[in-house]
Image (tube, grey):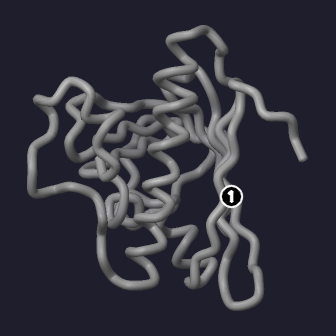
Amino acid sequence: MEKLSFDTFTKKINIKASMDKLYWCWASEEGICSWFLSSAKYLSPSGNTRDPKETIRGGDTYIWEWYNWSGKESGTILKANGKDSLEFSFADDSCKVLVSMEKKDNSVLVTLKQYDMPTDEETKMNIYNGCSCGWTFWLANLKAYLEHGILLNEKEYDLTAIPQAGHINVNM
């Protein structure tokens, strides 16, 4: 077992869905907005906007927006193999996220690893703690969406005026 540290964390979940469906959920605007984001935009290395149904590729850049958070996240798709693995820069390019998928019996094991994080106190709180908690929820949301057709994230109530909502509310 890897030694625990503040520069990396890993989250895993088994989801009963096809590999193709899971990859689509992560690797296209249409897919990632179905369970995770309020909007996503992907640009090819030449600056062309990818069609919402089109699969991302290494070298693309992204702009993401969530429900209940007024900020935007932008970064670069570092790798996307078209079937079971993708990697992107995250948190203002301060770290990387690798999402990999592996067939396991009647499910797919989704593994998310966020790594190369700075270890200053602010990053420990906002990136390590915030993202670790956030990814735990979002992976459960993905499972609920694909296995039961429901979304758990908050869309009805506006939580943006609550200063610590991202650290307190479990379904941001």
Q: Mark 1 sits on what residue?
A: 111
Element marked by disc 1: strand
Q: Residue at x 57, y 68 (%)?
A: 23
Question: Where residue 50 sits: x, y (%)?
Answer: 40, 52
> Mark 1 is on which residue type?
Thr
Q: Horizontal placement of 64 versus 27: left or right?
A: left
Is 171 rendered above or below residue 82?
above
Is 102 rendered above or below residue 92?
below
Question: Where residue 159 sits: x, y (%)?
Answer: 15, 40
Q: Which residue lies furthest to the bottom in this view?
A: 106
Q: Which residue lies furthest to the top in this view?
A: 120
Q: Which residue is drawn at 46% across and 23% down?
A: 126
Question: Where residue 133 sits: x, y (%)?
Answer: 49, 43
Q: How crowded is mark 1: few (under 14 residues within 10 Å), some or many (20 or more)?
A: some
Is 104 rendered above or below residue 96?
below
Q: Residue furthest right?
A: 1
Is 10 rendered above or below residue 144?
above
Q: Which residue is drawn at 68% across and 58% down?
A: 111
Q: Which residue is drawn at 11% across and 29% down?
A: 161
Give the total of numbered labels: 1
Question: Where residue 163 sits: x, y (%)?
Answer: 20, 24
